[in-house]
Image (spheres, rainbow, N blue to C red):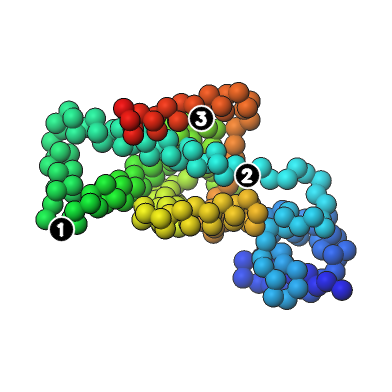
Amino acid sequence: MIEWFYKIKKEIHGPFTVEELMELIRAGRITKSTLVRKHKFGEWLAAEIYTEFEWNEEKTKVRPWLRLWARYLDSLLFVYLIQLLDRSSVPFVSPIIDWIMYGPFIIPGTEEYVMTTILLLVWIPLESLLLSLVGTTPGKFLFGVKVRNPDGARLSLRQACKRSFLVWWRGEAAGIPVIYLFTHASAYQTLKNKLRQTTWDREMNIIISHRPTSIWLEAIYYVIVAGLVYYSFFG
């Protein structure tokens, strides 16, 4: 017989039969996001991942690619903003960029990687301000991604800063080349096939929702971002 366990915070409950777990689901003790595992040493997964359980509500919609494109659009727009400030000779911007690109401590050939890492880090406070003040960013607004507390309220500045830092560190691997491909893949698997949440959103109890939209409208958004990507490389 398969033994089932569930975990709330750090407290593990079990073993149970699948029928007993279904009773707990009907009673509201176990929700779709509750961590459940088969056997004593199985992997903890969100309860809704398992096909053995039935839910009265629809499966949680997760859109990892949509979230990635929204974040990528934010990054592109931020880079364009920095470039605009540099070309406009805004005080302090050009000297700082020159120091980063041509400073004595930069290894030749690594300038762009260093600049990418720094820009991703600088984006953290700006993204945090946007999320706490207006509740969104340009990319998230365009792709209909909402970041909220369980009660629907916007994140506080402290929450937004912590979340942005965790995304930068765990999701983006601080912009380190090649490494970020592995962190992206890990975040995708966690969101799509394991927890139905990213680790940082689960830890901070943050809810991500998506605005209903048509496939044609989404396609237009993707074309816009693809055009910006092309322009950034070949424009």
Which SS class for mark 2?
loop
- Circle 1 is placed at which residue position? 105
- Circle 3 is placed at which residue position? 222
In this view of the protein, can residue 18 be seen by the observer?
yes
Which SS class for mark 1?
loop
Q: Quadrant of the N terminus?
A: bottom right
Badge 3 amino acid:
Tyr
- How far apart in space, not on screen, are marks 2 and 3 (Cα)? 18 Å
User: Percent x, y for residue 24?
Assistant: 81, 61
Badge 1 amino acid:
Phe
User: Mark 3 or mark 1, which is nearer the start of the sequence?
Assistant: 1
Q: Is residue 156 above or below residue 40?
A: above
- How far apart in space, not on screen, are marks 1 and 3 (Cα)? 38 Å
Residue 148 quadrant? top right
Residue at 64% across, 57% down: 194
Mark 2 against mark 1, which lies toward the viewer?
A: 1
Mark 2 against mark 3, which lies toward the viewer?
A: 3
Residue at 85% across, 60% down: 23
User: Percent x, y for residue 80?
Assistant: 30, 32
Q: Are marks 2 and 1 in contact (CB under 8 Å)?
A: no
Residue 62 image label: 2
Specify whether 50 is left or right of 33.
Answer: right
Specify whether 124 is left or right of 159.
Answer: left
Which SS class for mark 3?
helix
Residue 211 quadrant? top right
